Image (cartoon, rainbow, N blue to C red):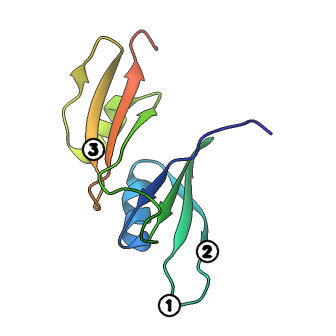
């Protein structure tokens, strides 16, 4: 097993959040609820990159910022209708999910 970090993002509606993350290339892996009417805890993955989306109060701070390296930031920018900007370390964009979590998405400079 490779060790890794999996960020947890707070979401109000896991279903709506999963739909938004699917636009970013993530796929829902599983969902857990202690009972049917309890908050959801969901994993989404894009290749080996995973994020937990939690409806549980206190699991994560609102407005969290995470950075996602991708092979083609231009394709992501087109999907979300945003402009790519040049930074010294990457070509990147910034997105905000429906719950206010921020994602900087970049392709490293010189990655062709």
Count of all numbered marks drawn on residues in the image:
3
Question: Residue 29 in the image: x percent, y percent?
Answer: 62, 61
Quick one: SS at disc 1?
A: loop
Quadrant housing residue 9: bottom left
Residue visible at 46% across and 48% down in the picture: 25
Position of residue 57 measured from the top left corner of the image (x, y, whole percent): 42, 71
Distance from the alpha carbon under mark 2 to that under mark 3:
26 Å
- For mark 1, what is the residue? 37
Secondary structure under tag 3 reads: strand
Q: Earlier in the sequence, mark 2 or mark 1?
A: 2
- Which residue position holds label 3? 95
In the figure, 7 relative to 60: above or below? Answer: above
Q: Is residue 40 above or below residue 38?
A: above
Q: Say which label, 2 or 3, has the lower sequence index.
A: 2
The crowding category of the residue bearing disc 2, from other C-alpha atoms within 10 Å (few below 14, some 14 to 19, many at least 20), is few
Image depth: mark 2 or mark 3 in front: 2
In the image shown, does 85 or 88 lie closer to the viewer?
88
Q: Position of residue 65 (x, y in %)?
A: 34, 42
Reading the image, the residue beneath label 2 is 32
Q: Residues within 10 Å of mark 1 (few under 14, many from 20)?
A: few
Task: Please report the residue visible at 27 percent of the width from the left and 33 percent of the height from the top.
Answer: 93
Residue 55 in the image: x percent, y percent? 44, 71
Q: Contact, CB < 8 Å: mark 1 with mark 3?
A: no
């Amino acid at each position: 097993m490779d060790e890794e970090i999996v960020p947890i993002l707070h979401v109000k509606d896991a279903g709506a959040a999963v739909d938004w993350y699917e636009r970013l290339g993530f796929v829902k892996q599983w969902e857990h609820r202690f009972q049917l009417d309890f908050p959801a805890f969901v994993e989404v993955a894009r290749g080996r990159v995973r994020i937990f989306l939690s409806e549980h109060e206190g699991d994560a701070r609102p407005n969290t910022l995470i950075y996602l390296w991708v092979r083609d930031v231009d394709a992501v920018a087109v999907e979300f209708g945003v402009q790519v900007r040049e930074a010294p370390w990457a070509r990147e964009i910034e997105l905000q999910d429906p719950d206010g979590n921020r994602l900087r998405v970049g392709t490293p400079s010189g990655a062709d």
